[in-house]
Image (tube, grey):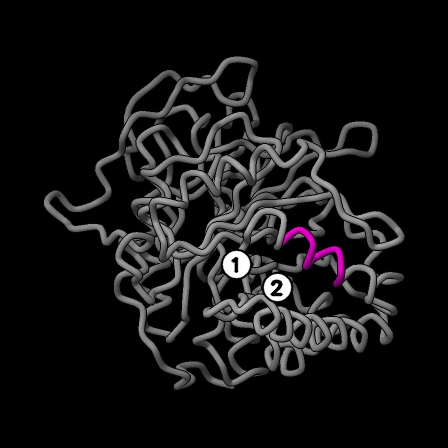
């Protein structure tokens, strides 16, 4: 058992104890400033439009790309920011002092992907509106977060959308005399069912600069089984595919381009209430009881997690908390688990690290600093270090 620091265990109620700095980064270690130095080791962070926390210079200097999420997409392919563009304008103001930092926007997400199937079948209007937003806010590119294409037609249309979008961005670069190419990326699923049915990864990677792999959607209150959001490996779990290693193995072997993959890291964790016995022989994986057909719980940002004693899973390389007296469970990331993910990415030739979401970090940016440190050892290679 790893001690994170001692506090009374007042977990997941109406008041949270603010988490202070944790000593997981080696003292005296140097953290590269990716944004200001132009480092090629990708550190990509999403920033939400609904956050009340402003983007800061301290964050900008540790990133290579910041992606503002999300404008609303309508059924006709029109796009608009509900906040009137305030967040993306504020991000651009900070980024102006860091010319190597790329500022993008992302569209879609779990709450606004319902029109992709229709729009992707005839994406002309959508592409025009994407270019309009890029021009209006002087952005460096766009990220597509379709959650998730499911049909045969979706799978084909997604590739066609990215092909047409790549062509439009290249033409727009020439028309506007822009020296740098526009950046195009997409956020990819983590599970086999979604990947097999909706993603032609080889086709998609022909047109994008990188993929933000959502390697943090393995466990949540959509089912009874507890677990960390982003276990590195799956030993002890009921389903051996629900982990970072399985997902990135799938992507790398399907595409042959690990350098285009970004390993996604959550700055939040899932929690459950009414949690009882183990799902098998591993104490990290437990079973929650539904109340009126629903599993009680949700997610909590890193900045709001109370500091307390936690268990460390030495295979999955993540911390978790199980309060047996109150039947509450929390899985989460910390700087130590991020360090292991950085080492893994370097060993597997993964090209970048990605964050959802920057605004969930603490005031000292403990998590972002750990990500930037983890990215410092990434390699530039498409050698496949997986068994395919």
CA–CA distance between discs 1 and 2?
Answer: 14 Å
User: What is the magenta range?
Assistant: 127-134
Q: Quadrant of residue 342?
A: bottom left
Q: Name the secondary structure under disc 1.
A: loop
Magenta run includes residue 52? no
Name the N-terminal-most of marks 1 and 2. Answer: 1
Which numbered tag is attached to residue 186? Answer: 2
Q: Nearer the viewer, mark 1 or mark 2?
A: 1
Return the x and y of residue 320 as percentages of the image width and height.
44, 39
Image quadrant occupied by the N terminus: top left
Q: Quadrant of residue 286?
A: top right
Disc 1, disc 2: CB below 8 Å? no
For residue 325, side relative to residue 109 (left or right): left
Return the x and y of residue 68 as percentages of the image width and height.
56, 45
- The residue at the point 64 percent across, 77 percent down is 201
- The residue at the point 26 percent across, 61 percent down is 376
Determine the main secondary structure of the stretch shown in magenta.
Answer: helix
Please identify the residue farthest to the left as the structure is shown: 28
For residue 153, side relative to residue 388 (left or right): right
- The residue at the point 50 percent across, 38 percent down is 268
Return the x and y of residue 370 as percentages of the image width and height.
30, 47
Which numbered tag is attached to residue 140? Answer: 1
- 10 Å crowding of disc 2: few (<14), some (14-19), many (20+): many
Q: In which quarter of the image is residue 347?
A: bottom left
């Amino acid at each position: 058992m790893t001690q994170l620091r001692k506090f009374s265990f007042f977990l997941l109620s109406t008041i949270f104890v603010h988490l202070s700095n944790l000593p997981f980064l080696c003292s005296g270690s140097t953290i590269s400033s990716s944004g200001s130095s132009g480092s090629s080791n990708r550190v990509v962070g999403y920033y939400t439009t609904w956050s009340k926390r402003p983007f800061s210079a301290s964050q900008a200097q540790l990133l290579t790309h910041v992606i503002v999420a999300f404008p609303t997409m309508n059924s006709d392919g029109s796009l608009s920011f509900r906040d009137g563009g305030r967040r993306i304008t504020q991000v651009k103001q900070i980024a102006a002092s860091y010319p190597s930092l790329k500022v993008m926007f992302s569209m879609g997400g779990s709450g606004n992907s319902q029109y992709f199937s229709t729009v992707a079948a005839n994406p002309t209007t959508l592409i025009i509106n994407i270019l309009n937003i890029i021009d209006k806010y002087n952005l460096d590119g766009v990220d597509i977060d379709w959650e998730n294409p499911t049909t045969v037609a979706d799978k084909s249309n997604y590739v066609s959308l990215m092909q047409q979008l790549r062509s439009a961005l290249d033409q727009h670069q020439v028309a506007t005399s822009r020296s740098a190419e526009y950046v195009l990326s997409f956020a990819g699923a983590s599970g086999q069912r979604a990947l097999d049915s909706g993603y032609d990864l080889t086709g998609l990677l022909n047109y994008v600069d990188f993929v933000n792999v959502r390697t943090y959607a393995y466990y949540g209150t959509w089912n009874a089984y507890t677990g960390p959001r982003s276990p590195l490996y799956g030993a002890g779990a009921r389903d051996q595919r629900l982990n970072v290693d399985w997902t990135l193995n799938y992507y790398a072997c399907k595409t042959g381009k690990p350098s285009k993959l970004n390993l996604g890291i959550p700055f939040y964790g899932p929690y459950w209430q009414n949690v009882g016995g183990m799902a098998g022989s591993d104490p990290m994986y437990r079973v929650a009881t539904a109340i009126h057909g629903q599993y009680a719980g949700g997610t909590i940002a890193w900045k709001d997690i109370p500091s307390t004693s936690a268990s460390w899973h030495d295979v999955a390389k993540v911390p978790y908390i199980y309060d047996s007296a109150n039947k509450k469970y929390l899985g989460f990331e910390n700087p130590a688990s991020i360090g292991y993910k950085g080492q893994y990415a370097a060993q597997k030739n993964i090209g970048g690290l990605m964050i959802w979401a920057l605004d969930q970090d603490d005031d000292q940016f403990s998590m972002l600093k750990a990500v930037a440190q983890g990215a410092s050892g990434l390699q530039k290679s498409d050698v496949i270090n997986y068994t395919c």
